Amino acid sequence: MSPETILLLLLLLAGAYMAWNIGANDVANAMGTSVGSGALTLRQALLVAAVLEFSGAFFFGSHVSQTIQSGLVNPEVFLPTPMILAYGMLAALIGTGLWLQIASYFGWPVSTTHGIVGGIVGFGFAVGGFEAVYWDNVIYVVTSWVLSPLLGGIFSYGIFNFLRKHVLYTANPVRQAKKITPIAVFIVITTLAQIMVYKGLENVFGKFSFLEALAFSLLVGGVCALISHFLLKNIKENLIRPQEHPYGAEVANELDKAKRHLQQALEACRGEVHFQVSSLLQEINTTSLALKQTARGRVMSTEYMLVERIFGYMQILSACLMAFAHGANDVANAIGPFSAAIGVIETGTINPEGKVPTWALGLGGLGIVVGLATWGWRVMETIGKKITELTPTRGFAAEFGAAATILLASRLGLPISTTHTLVGSVVGIGLARGIEALDLSMTRDIVISWVVTVPVCGGLTVAVFYLLEAIL
């Protein structure tokens, strides 16, 4: 076989291998919150994600693939020897895939976006020098890595606080849930339909105007909201008795904040003032503990269990949005380098504006699904249960906030990290409940895995590149 044929076969295998690793590691971030809260079983999560991950990758993945394909390394540097770029993209797929497989085996939720960007930039810098890398674009991408957890955390924090104030901390949480759920269904479905239709389906149906996409998405969102309204009408409402009025948890959180300030004051004062502050701190501590015990007992009441069941269905809906968004964004990590290398083999030249082929998106989507079905459970259990305790209301807020961030970034062409966004969203939920609700050691380990991934993938990519160059 000719070197080009061998390279083509290696690219097909490496692209599928990388997509498999994305499914095994990163998809866990998309579905782990649903499993952790109990809204979906592991098998149900696998089925939901399989359909929607593939749909997002196939119908919506091409836009962000352009950034990974030609937005990080200057292809003009490789014009005299275009095959070098093809080798580099193959090395990036293999090197990043190796690190992802190691991480998946140990259940580490690393960022595939970090990995592939680090691999491509490492190769470009090592082979082409400083001028081979689009450093402005790299900084733009790195900025999006910082913004994505912040935006995800802010969105999720706001959504959960809204639900807590207008549903969980009301005298009749079931009635409030029945009022708010159709509105939430409308927003979620309209968001998904709007993003999917407006330029998202151009590979299949051609371009839609903004008004056509808006009208269609509003119609779909309205129909789904109406269906949810009628389904909720049969749920009975039971008023909470006055002595069980659910402001205990909210007051306890505020008292915890007051305790921290009083602790600082206690360290700074002496004498009689020290005694008075100490007594006040002890009194607040007793009151806070009593309120928390009351809240824990009430959470298991019929009303709250019913509210969580309602939002369990809502979380399934947000999980669908999350899976679709993840497929749209993260298929680029496998297909961008793959498409760039395939273009070099087919034409013998470098074409930065090359169209991402539909069959390549299909290959990437299929690889993601297979990886999810085989190894996805490893990281899914880590993400779903170890950052903070999740319930369906918390999981819904985290998933919807993260999905909105990812879909927005995907339309802007930012290859953000799903890991960053979801961890930021879950941390936002934990902060809304107080910092003690977070497992800070687990959060620290996840952040460390993000930092380590970039240099490891860059180094592996350079090593694989020189090995391929010597063999081929």
Image: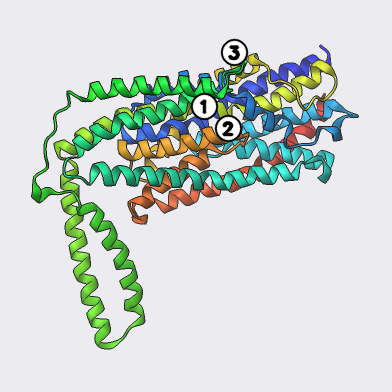
Q: Earlier in the sequence, mark 1 or mark 2?
A: 1
Question: Which of 98 and 250 lies nearest the eye of the viewer?
Answer: 250
Amino acid type for the residue under numbered disc 3? Val
Q: Quadrant of residue 4?
A: top right
- Furthest residue in direction front, as rendered: 211
Q: Indicate the secondary structure of the residue bearing disc 2.
A: helix
Q: Quadrant of residue 456?
A: top right
Tell us which disc is closer to us: 1 or 2. 1
How far from the left and from the top, in percent, is residue 200?
57, 22
Question: Which residue is labeled 1 in the image?
Answer: 195
Question: Which residue is labeled 3 in the image?
Answer: 204
Image height of 421 relative to 432, above or below = above
* CA–CA distance in space, label 1 to label 2: 10 Å
Q: Earlier in the sequence, mark 1 or mark 3?
A: 1
Q: Indicate the secondary structure of the residue bearing disc 3.
A: helix
Please give the count of numbered marks on the rendered protein. Answer: 3
* CA–CA distance in space, label 3 to label 2: 18 Å
How far from the left and from the top, in percent, is residue 366?
55, 17
Q: Indicate the secondary structure of the residue bearing disc 1.
A: helix
Question: Which residue is labeled 2 in the image?
Answer: 410
- Badge 3 crowding class, 10 Å Cα cut-off, few under 14, some 14 to 19, many 20 or more, is few
Q: Residue at x 27, y 88 (%)?
A: 271
